[in-house]
Amino acid sequence: MKIQMNVFPMHHRCEPIDYKAIFFMAVSVIAMISIIAVIYVISYFSYSAKKSSSEEPVQKEQATLRRLEGEVQQKNVIKQKTVFDEKKKIELNKEIREFNKIKRDFHWGLFFQKLEELTPDRIWVKNFVISRFPSFYISCEASDIFKPIEFVKNLEMSYYFKNIFLGKAEEDKDSMAIRFTLEMELNEKKFKEGI
């Protein structure tokens, strides 16, 4: 038989291990960790639910805001076109008023009569354009090269026209005619005196 003797002093001796206390301690630590985990999971899911529920109205409002911004941009484009159209309309009305004033105040019958009298034989007036009253352009055709010069002299001698400029003259190979342009101004005073 063996005899065991513990020679350690009393305060250094090991006490027997209490396994029940260790078991309860482990169970309580695991329970506390699981409670903390459950609280964390519950708070996470409630936060995500609140976040998703709060994001839905925000997303709806953002979609509404984007739609309204698009409508505002469309209305701005329409407004700019309308403003542009209004400016164009005002400009066109101004030109029409000016044309009507010229038509009303100027004696076009006398003008065309004088132009016909001063046009030499074998010259044909093809086009007549008022650039800025009293300035205008005439496009003509002549049978030979000397007719445009004769036409310019007739116009200068009449005193009904002033600042006469003979533009580019060129020969049309198909019809063998001379095409030329004249730029001139009306002497309104003479036209008013001639009536």
Image (cartoon, rainbow, N blue to C red):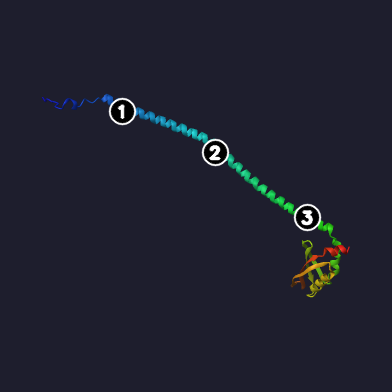
Indicate which disc residue 26 carries: 1
> Extreme left residue here?
1
Residue 134 vs 19, above or below: the answer is: below
Rendered image quadrant of residue 135: bottom right
Looking at the image, is mark 2 or mark 3 earlier in the sequence? Answer: 2
At mark 3, the secondary structure is helix
At mark 2, the secondary structure is helix
Answer whether residue 57 is visible to the viewer in this image. Answer: yes
Q: Callout 2 environment at 10 Å: few (<14), some (14 to 19), or many (20+)?
A: few
Q: Position of residue 46 (x, y in %)?
A: 46, 31
Answer whether residue 175 is visible to the viewer in this image. Answer: no
**151 or 153: which is nearer to us?**
153
Residue behind mark 2: 59
Q: Position of residue 23 (x, y in %)?
A: 29, 26
Indicate which disc residue 96 carries: 3
Rendered image quadrant of residue 152: bottom right
Looking at the image, is mark 2 or mark 1 earlier in the sequence? Answer: 1
